[in-house]
Image: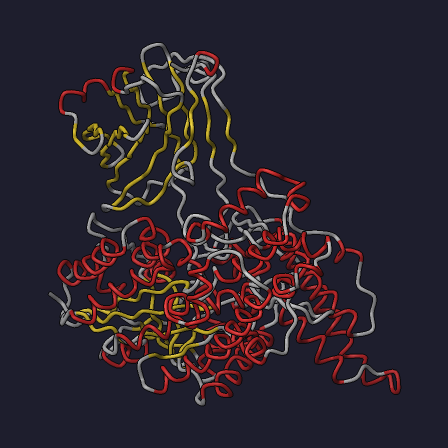
Amino acid sequence: MIPIHLVILWHMHQPQYRDPASGRYLLPWTRLHALKDYFGMVKMLEEFPGVHATFNLVPALGHQLEEYASGDFREVWLDAAMTPVESLTPEIKAEILLRAFQLNQERIMSRWPRFVEIHQHVQAAGREAAQGMSVRDWRDLQLLSQLAWMDEEYLARDPVVSSLAAEGANFTETDKVALRDKQFELLRRVLPEYAAAAQRGQIELSTTPFYHPILPLLCDTRAAQESNPRSPHISPPFIHPEDAREQLLRARRFHVAHFGNPPSGLWPSEGSVSDVALTIAAELGFRWFASDEGVLGRTLQVGFGRDAAGVPDNPKSLYSPWRLRLSTGDIVGLFRDHYLSDLVGFVYSRMSAESAAEDLHRRIRAIGEGAHSDRPLTVPLILDGENAWEYFPGNGRDFLRRFYSRIQADPDIRPLTASEAIAAAGELPTIAHIVPGSWINANFDIWAGHAEDVRAWDLLRDTHEVYERALRINPSLGAAAITPERIAHAYESLLTAEGSDWCWWYGPEHSSVNDAEFDAIYRTHLTEVHLALGAEAPESLAQPIKRPPERALVLPPSDFLRVTVDGRETSYFEWLGAGLYSADLQESAMHGRTHHLHELRYGFDRDALFLRVDSVPGAFQELRECEFHLRVKYSDADLVVIVHVEAGRITEHSIEQAGVCLLAGKEKAQVALGTILEVRLARDLIPLAGISSLEIGVALWHGGLPIDVLPAQGTLTVSLGEDNFAW
């Protein structure tokens, strides 16, 4: 086996949630993730001294953590959660009901039966929920909504927090104060814990441009067309490389002030790179950067398609640092294994901790066993260090401990920091140019690919022009000149508005319950520039950019079906009357889940259940082989049809019932794949006695793992009976 140098990089990031006008934190995510993720992620590495890792701390996040640690802050949600119940106003109650349930209900809320009970009451009562809640209900909801975000070790071992967790209900105002004090204690420990881990040499701290902007787009938004010629034009373009430099300079200053040394490494926001942006980074002293394999593939004009074990084509190219030779100096690039990183971010949460850790360890070893190289392979595992864990049992801690334990004990795998891995790689291959792109599809469409994005950039460009004009004329204004403090405030708001997070939520790709708030915060930062300069903000900044998102479409059957199972829509009428689940292809805070499945149709005739699966166009181009798992659940058992596909053709199918393969029942399931997947299941496969509904769903498997599922929650309830056009 070829030795593996494993580079684990956890990216920690939240945008600036503080309202520049009021100074209040409008959204709580920095505090909540600090409690649940930021402290524990680095603290647990003490248990595994042989595991070295890299943590990327965005300075805008670090600045907020510092403010939270000081205790000198105001946050709308924390104030509401800690207000004595007797003092709750209708407005504060509305804030509590809005915020308290914004967490993963399956993995986090379900740990607290009382939390679930209150949530069910609120859902059932709808708009009248507040009127039906008692003092006990309000107080329990306030405390549990905060307790649920506490670090796993605090929940297990801290005397105060574990005691509250054990009680689970009937809390007092004194309990709320005690929990608040524990939150502040934990917040004070976050940044020092990172500094201590870096000091003992176990982690490397890298950085990102201060407010997390997309550097290539700051330098010149025409980079979007260079990356994707079909990307819409921002006209006139936004061209401010001086702001890109300022964002990097501020990041370096913050890093030195808090950790003692300038950072060697840079995770450019969203892995976004270009020659111009990296030239600035190299000039400022950055020695390495990280991006995605898609950017490297486009640069080298090679592909990294995987076999069934996940081993890519061209492994020597992917698993090597690359020296980028620029006009003013060199900088070394690491390129994340997109496949492995996405398994951690989007797949392993559905598996047991041991199975997931074993699978990831096995896949890393498979790279060393299947590739050919005359030197160790550098395998970068780079992903979000916060958002994924709420989808794991126990916040992912058991999975991480088992994985760290495995790689620490494996003599063929060396978990190194990014700088250590580059130093150990020996002589590096070189490139003289890098194709502009990000970790998402190797382009910038997420931030500049939709009309909403274009409007956001137009507003930013116009506001920047107002700022530049004020700088030009200010010296001639004499006593009426704008003060340096106001100019600095205007520029701070401008740099904040350049962050990538605002455009993340524009366009069709992402949506959350906080869409309107993100939109408003972005426009508030731009408005603040005008106000700081003594100008009136234009009416355009009062108009929302984000349109309300479309949601999943769910329709029940409206007729019995007459289907010919041939893998195509034989006629317009064939599936007319079928039930439908059409997926909402938008996502939440995390991006990277690749959508393959789009729609699930279903219906009945007198003798069979029919299922149809429509894929996202082009979704299967990189999948050499895959499996569809179509599940029908009834009572306490289920029936699963497994359809194996290679090169777009069905090679075999099988049926399992309650986990046992039905050798004699295979002929009772017809399957066909063409432009669509069609399945017919004979009625006698499913025992109907005593049941009034079925649960149906489809999962797509690749390389032994589920990579997509419809519906998103796993199954869809199908009511039976003639009135429902069913058995």
Rendering quarter of residue 673: top left
Q: How many marks?
A: 0
Q: Which x, y percent locates residue 237?
A: 63, 62
Q: Which x, y percent locates residue 562?
A: 38, 11
User: Which quadrant is the N terminus positioned in?
Assistant: bottom left
Left or right of 572 in this view: 76? right
Outermost residue to the right: 479
User: Which quadrant is the C terminus positioned in?
Assistant: top left
Q: For this rendering, which residue is in front, 450 or 383?
A: 383
Q: Which x, y percent locates residue 469?
A: 77, 74
Residue plotted at (33% across, 38% down): 699
Residue plotted at (36% across, 82% down): 197
Outermost residue to the top: 606
Q: Which x, y percent locates residue 47?
A: 27, 75
Tell me: residue 366, above or below residue 245: above
Rendering quarter of residue 606: top left
Outermost residue to the bottom: 260
Residue plotted at (42% across, 25% down): 718
